[in-house]
Amino acid sequence: MKDVKITVVKIARYDDLIEKYENPIENACDMREGMVFVSRGFQKPEGFCDSAWDSIQPFASALSFGAEDFYDGWMKNKKSAMISCNDGFRPVSFLLEVEE
């Protein structure tokens, strides 16, 4: 098994959707661009959002166990994936990369 580096690369925010559909939330997301986490297999990194982990865990695990080239050439680096969490109001994009 290899470690997988998870980097927060972008956080979007859709204020129009938040205003229209979301109940007020005090602290919806603790992620910040540039944050880096490391995962091994099925292990969620300490301090990582549970909901975001649900979205990226299958890719992190697959990369950890040697999978590569998801979706036939989707990523320039075959040992990586760009995955977003499932928050429709403030999605976070994560770059997952195998650490050699």
Image (cartoon, rainbow, N blue to C red):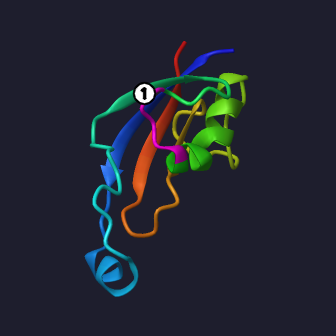
In the image, residue 35 lies at what x, y percent? 31, 33
Between 3 and 23, the residue placed more toward the observer is 23
- Looking at the rendering, the stretch of residues picked out in magenta corresponds to 46-50
Q: Residue at x 30, y 55 (%)?
A: 27
Residue indicated by mark 1: 37
Residue 74 seen in this snapshot: no
Instruction: Give the quadrant of the C terminus.
Output: top right
| Residue 82 sits above or below residue 39 on the image | below
Q: Main secondary structure of the magenta part?
A: loop
Q: Residue at x 32, y 61 (%)?
A: 12
Between 42 and 8, the residue placed more toward the observer is 42
| Residue 60 sits above or below residue 27 on the image | above
Element carrying mark 1: strand
Q: Quadrant of residue 7?
A: top left
In the image, residue 97 lies at what x, y percent? 51, 29
In the image, residue 89 lies at what x, y percent? 39, 69
Residue 80 in the figure: left or right of residue 26: right
Badge 1 amino acid: Phe
Q: Residue at x 37, y 76 (%)?
A: 23
Q: Quadrant of residue 33?
A: top left
Residue 27 seen in this snapshot: yes
Instruction: Give the quadrant of the N terminus.
Output: top right
Residue 37 in the figure: left or right of residue 13: right
In the image, residue 66 lies at what x, y percent? 71, 23
